[in-house]
Image (cartoon, grey):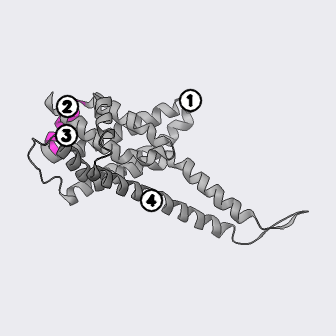
Amino acid sequence: MIFQAFFAALGQLPDPRFRSVLLRGLGLTIGLLFGFYLVLRWLIGLIFSDPVTLPFFGEVTWIDSALGWGTLGLVLLMSVFLMVPVASAITGLFLDEVADAVEAEHYPHLPVVKGVHFLDGLMDSLGFLGVLIGANIAALFLYVIFPFAAPFIFYGMNGYLLGREYFQLAAMRREGREGAKALRRKHNATIWAAGCLMAIPLSFPLINLVIPILGAATFTHLYHRLSRD
């Protein structure tokens, strides 16, 4: 069921309406990561603002260029962790548009819904984002205590949280908040597994850029399949 939902989302890439949302989500994702790069580069520039002089070599002029490329590499490496909160933030902004495009293509018999009110979606997204960031900060201690289990902790925890958020927002459009919670509790294991399968590609640089929007489409399909059971 999960893979069917994902491949259905992937198969909609040629759809202009879906591709438009994907490109905007991709642009926003790149913009957020680039903004983080600029902030990090600025902070490093403050620390190494003066020319560096080394014994026997004198003044070194290539340090700034090396730091620039090093910072870019560091951001790509950190995107393994950064993309989890980025994916969470993008959900609240684009899920309604993604769900509309998916339903127009695959579920045209369903009545049109108004979707989640912007403020409700924003508040839910901010709440999820806060929980996500707090949980990942707390998990740092577990990574130190159980280093060999760190990947399982990372993917298991973020898979649960991302699956919970994506499904809740996808289901809430038609079920309401309480109905979405009840459906999520009923299918918690499936939603957790789908969230884990979403969290794994989020840790691969470049591939992770398209996952937030594809994830929103996948969970829209998943909601419709689970709501029929």
Q: Main secondary structure of the magenta part?
A: helix
What's the distance in space between the residues labelled 1 and 4, CA to CA?
31 Å
Q: Give the class, few, some or many, for how many residues have Cα within 10 Å of label 2's Cα (few <14, many ≥20).
A: some
Residue at point 37% right, 55% down?
A: 23
Residue 205 among magenta residues: no
Which amino acid is tagged 3?
A: His
CA–CA distance between discs 2 and 3? 15 Å
Q: What is the x, y in percent for residue 184?
A: 22, 35
Q: State the SS at label 4.
A: helix
Looking at the rendered structure, the secondary structure element under dot 2 is helix
How many marks on residues? Answer: 4
- Which element type, helix, strand or loop, lies under badge 1? helix
Q: Which residue is mark 3?
A: 106
Question: Mark 2: which amino acid?
Answer: Leu
Of pointers 4 and 3, the one earlier in the residue sequence: 4
Query: Residue 140's spot in the image, x, y percent?
Result: 51, 42
Q: Position of residue 173 (x, y in %)?
A: 16, 47
Give the class, few, some or many, for how many residues have Cα within 10 Å of label 3's Cα (few <14, many ≥20).
few
Residue 41 x %, y %: 59, 64
Q: Which residue is mark 4?
A: 32
Give the distance between the C-alpha atoms of the residues marked 4 and 3, in whole angstroms: 31 Å
Magenta span of residues: 177-187
Q: Earlier in the sequence, mark 2 or mark 1?
A: 1
Q: Is residue 60 left or right of residue 122?
A: right
Which residue was labeled with disc 1? 148
| Residue 182 sits inside the magenta stretch | yes
Question: Residue 55's image quarter?
Answer: bottom right
